[in-house]
Image (tube, rainbow, N blue to C red):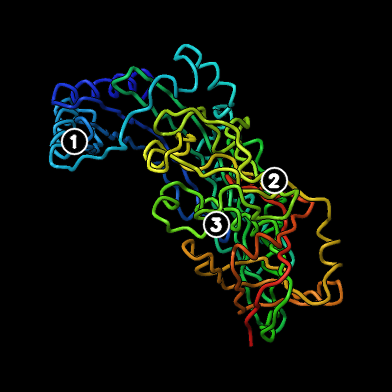
């Protein structure tokens, strides 16, 4: 379905809502196609193509809110959706913080939107493959993986591509169109040692442009390496020690920070960072940027789901927490404007440090290099952190042997204050990007 049709249905939905009694209305319409090929041990196991549409409507009657969803473009279904949303609003209590984004909160004039959207470069139509080509790529990656040393068989190889378009229309006149693509590949291998011990490991990558994906040769190499690395792993005695989160795992720490600074958590006092605004929570020099304007960025955008303009922010500046991430409602509750984060964060980056991974390892007498995390993770309310982990033991400045079946534990505030980023950087195209990070001391509970 083309953009013009999606806009038409969005405007119709808003119109039906106003006729049904809404004083304000905002419609979201999206359509997309996802294609997937799965291969295992030289055999194509799955070929799938799924297309879908979603329509959702949020309305206001004064300060009373209502919402409803629909998966049909049939006129009667759209009208029914509008009537349902209005009925829900009439039965709801007033929310004094509810409102639509006014025009001065929009990213730019409506005439400027298309050009600015194109500048984000979020569509790679040329990268789209036919199903036979996707099968060929999956089978090639499978062969390359099985050719890697120690690989007994593949667990899964997956090639996917997605194309989509979403539209926001509201009763104040906003009309926004976002089109996007994404491409990904994933490979997981099972390796076997001479003594019969087996272990698995994988590598995955998702990008807006297919040409930005790493090669199948590199994907196979990484998957096999991660699988081989933990062969022979055993627990270690419980102790306090430095812990290095490799660049595939360190983004989870920044993700915990982001969850803790959402306005709703702050207002509810359910975050360990409540009343920490303006305080030094990381070392001096640490910078974490939320940048929605990165070309080809997976979370790049001009506005959030409430049509509030997006901006580039230093969430952490020289170690200091500078902001909370707010929507219109959570911002109003806190007495501050929306920061344009009703859709969550955009492309978040912990800026790299000056020391290499080798230098960080060389500075440790006894510690743990974490390459895999399992289980719960952080408690956002208290900041307590506990997760199952596996990785490599560090002794006298060198990586010595693999470790598994341990639990790493600490408190996020303490971990943040000790955190030292390395000079490398993840290249997996994630929405949270971070280098390898050293946390000066944690409890590692093992045997």
Q: Is residue 316 left or right of residue 114?
A: right
Dividing the picture into quarters, in which one does residue 412 lie? Answer: bottom right
Choose mark 1 or mark 3, whichever is in front. Answer: 3
Dividing the picture into quarters, in which one does residue 77 lie? Answer: top left
For disc 2, the marked residue is 287
Secondary element type, mark 1: helix
Q: Position of residue 85 (x, y in %)?
A: 18, 35
Q: Is residue 420 left or right of residue 326?
A: right
For disc 1, the marked residue is 85
Secondary element type, mark 2: loop
Rendered view: 109 above or below 224: above
Q: CA distance from mark 1 to mark 3?
A: 34 Å
Q: Is residue 196 left or right of residue 334?
A: right
For disc 3, the marked residue is 256
Q: Position of residue 321 (x, y in %)?
A: 61, 48
Rendered view: 35 above or below 377: above
């Amino acid at each position: 379905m083309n953009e013009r049709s999606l806009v038409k249905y969005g405007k119709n939905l808003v119109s039906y809502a106003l006729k049904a009694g809404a004083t304000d209305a905002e419609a979201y319409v999206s359509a997309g196609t996802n294609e997937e090929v799965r291969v295992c041990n030289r055999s194509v196991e799955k070929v799938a193509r799924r297309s879908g549409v979603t329509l959702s409507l949020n309305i206001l009657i004064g300060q009373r809110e209502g919402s409803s969803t629909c998966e049909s473009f049939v006129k009667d279904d759209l009208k029914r959706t509008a009537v349902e949303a209005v009925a829900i609003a009439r039965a709801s209590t007033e929310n004094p913080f509810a409102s639509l984004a006014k025009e001065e909160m929009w990213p730019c004039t409506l005439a400027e939107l298309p050009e600015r959207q194109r500048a984000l470069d979020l569509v790679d139509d040329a990268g789209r493959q036919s199903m036979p080509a996707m099968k060929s790529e999956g089978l090639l990656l499978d062969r390359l993986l099985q050719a890697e040393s120690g690989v007994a068989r593949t667990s899964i190889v997956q090639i996917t591509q997605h194309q989509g378009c979403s539209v926001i229309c509201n009763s104040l006149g906003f009309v926004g169109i976002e089109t996007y693509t994404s491409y990904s590949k994933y490979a997981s291998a099972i390796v076997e040692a001479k003594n019969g011990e087996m272990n698995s490991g994988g590598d995955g990558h998702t990008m807006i442009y297919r040409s930005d994906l790493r090669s199948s040769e590199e994907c196979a190499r990484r998957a096999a390496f991660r699988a081989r690395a933990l062969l022979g792993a055993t627990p270690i005695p419980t102790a306090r020690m430095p812990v290095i989160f490799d660049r595939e795992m360190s983004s989870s720490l920044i993700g915990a920070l982001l969850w803790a600074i959402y306005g709703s958590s702050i207002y509810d006092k359910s975050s360990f960072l409540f009343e920490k605004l303006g305080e030094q929570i990381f070392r001096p020099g640490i910078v974490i940027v939320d940048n929605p304007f990165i070309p080809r960025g997976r979370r790049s955008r001009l506005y959030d789901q409430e049509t509030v303009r997006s901006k580039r922010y230093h969430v952490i500046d020289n170690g200091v927490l500078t902001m909370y991430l707010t929507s219109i409602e959570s911002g109003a509750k806190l007495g501050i404007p929306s920061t344009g984060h009703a859709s969550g964060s955009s492309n978040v980056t912990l800026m790299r440090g000056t020391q290499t991974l080798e230098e960080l390892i060389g500075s440790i007498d006894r510690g743990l290099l974490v390459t895999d995390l399992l289980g719960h993770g952080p408690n956002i309310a208290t900041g307590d952190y506990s997760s199952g982990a596996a990785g490599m033991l560090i002794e006298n400045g060198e990586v010595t042997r693999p470790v598994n079946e341990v639990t790493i534990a600490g408190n996020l505030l303490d971990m943040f204050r000790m955190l030292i980023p390395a000079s490398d950087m993840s290249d997996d195209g994630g929405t949270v990007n971070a280098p390898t990070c050293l946390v000066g001391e944690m409890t590692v509970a093992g045997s």
